[in-house]
Image (tube, rainbow, N blue to C red):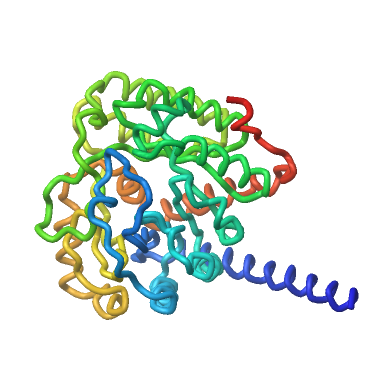
Amino acid sequence: MKHSKRIKGNNEVITSLVFTLEKAARIVLCSLLPDRPYHVQWLITRKCNYRCRGCNVWRDQDSKELSTNEIKKGLDILKEIGVIDIVFSGGNPLLRDDIGEILEYASRFFVTTVYDNGSMALEKIDALRNVDFVAISLDSLNPEKNDYVKGVKGSWDRAMQAIDTLYEKGISVGISPTISQFNLHEIINLTKFFSEKGVPVWYCLYSHDSPVDSDQLFRIGKMNDEFEIVDREAMVKLCDALDDMKKKNNNIFITAKILKAVKQLFLDGKRLWKCRALQSFFMIDHLGRVAGCHLRNPVTSIFDLTNVWNGDDFNALRKNYKECAGCIYLCYIFYSIHGGVLGNFQIVQDKWKSAKLFLKRNSSKSLSLVRQQ
């Protein structure tokens, strides 16, 4: 019996290794192929258990969503057209009962990230072992301020406990603060606190949805004067500071090109990028509808995507989106600036380099984040 268990365990390790090698080979190959949609964000649910003040999602919840098998079918299509990087968000994707099965399947083929507001990670910890990155939304080291932003008392405590536990278990966890006027002057301290402990930090930038299309895919950012960045000089200084910090710390996940672009935007409003929606990235909502970004109208279904991707209608949309200046969502800036073969190869290289940080770490070491506060 013991021998049988040992064989089974060895087979699982070998199987896991094969999946990892196949995945790495596929990602490198797809990174070198031109004219592919390398990056996808899939908003797989509109359900959310928080009440974030700068967000619309919880105000427009919808119980309808694709089934497990439908999402797997969609993932097969994304694999076929060359996607290398997928982010699962929502709503809170960890509220789905089938999230473990979805993440396990996606992680076989894609660099896979899943977002959580810090409330569900501990309940779904086994499901999170399969992903490349778990991003916990945390906006302040001050419990009261963070709870205010999230609209839920105790959200800071739950997020900190989740980060601490995932780190201790060897799961690739990082924090994802949304930079806004509300926390602009504490981002450096927040970054130092986590990055120096070996917890990666990657950033969102507060932006509210501006009217672009009449039937936008997904309402996310809500206009809030508390969060609108008005201190442009402080934002410029933050970009410079993060640029200096990241030269010494690999746990700061933002590129020099992105910091340069954001700095220029707040200096004089000039955009150093052209939007690459429906070229290097696109969005999928909880019903499987596809759009260049969440601000745009749905243009097809994930299940019909292969039939229209290279068509004239999509090419016309790409030209239109290229001239769009309707948002400052950092993820769209990132995938626009780092689009194309060279940019995508650099992204993959950086992400696998970052993943090695977790492999080198002693998985038994605890951050003890909660206890240190």
Name the quarter where the C terminus is drawn: top right
Q: In x, y percent, where is residue 101?
A: 52, 70
Whether 246 is drawn above or below 47: the answer is above
Residues 143 and 133: in front is 143
Whether residue 200 can be seen here: yes
Whether residue 32 can be seen here: no
Left or right, 296 with respect to 80, comes to left
Q: Residue at x 25, y 41 (%)?
A: 328
Dividing the picture into quadrants, the one containing residue 107 is bottom right
Q: Residue at x 63, y 65 (%)?
A: 20
Q: Residue at x 47, y 35 (%)?
A: 156
Left or right, 182 with respect to 138, comes to left
Left or right, 208 with respect to 241, comes to left
Residues 229 and 158: in front is 158
Dividing the picture into quadrants, the one containing residue 140 is top left
Q: In x, y percent, where is residue 106?
A: 50, 67
Q: In x, y percent, where is residue 221?
A: 24, 45
Left or right, 270 with respect to 162, comes to left
Q: Residue at x 25, y 23 (%)?
A: 232
Residues 159 and 190: in front is 159
Residues 327 and 51: in front is 51
Whether 360 is drawn above or below 85: the answer is above
Whether 371 is drawn above or below 117: the answer is above
Among all residues in the image, which is located at the extreme front? Answer: 153
Dividing the picture into quadrants, the one containing residue 316 is bottom left
- In this rendering, the count of numbered labels is 0
Among all residues in the image, which is located at the extreme left? Answer: 214
Q: In x, y percent, where is residue 80?
A: 42, 76
Name the quarter where the N terminus is drawn: bottom right
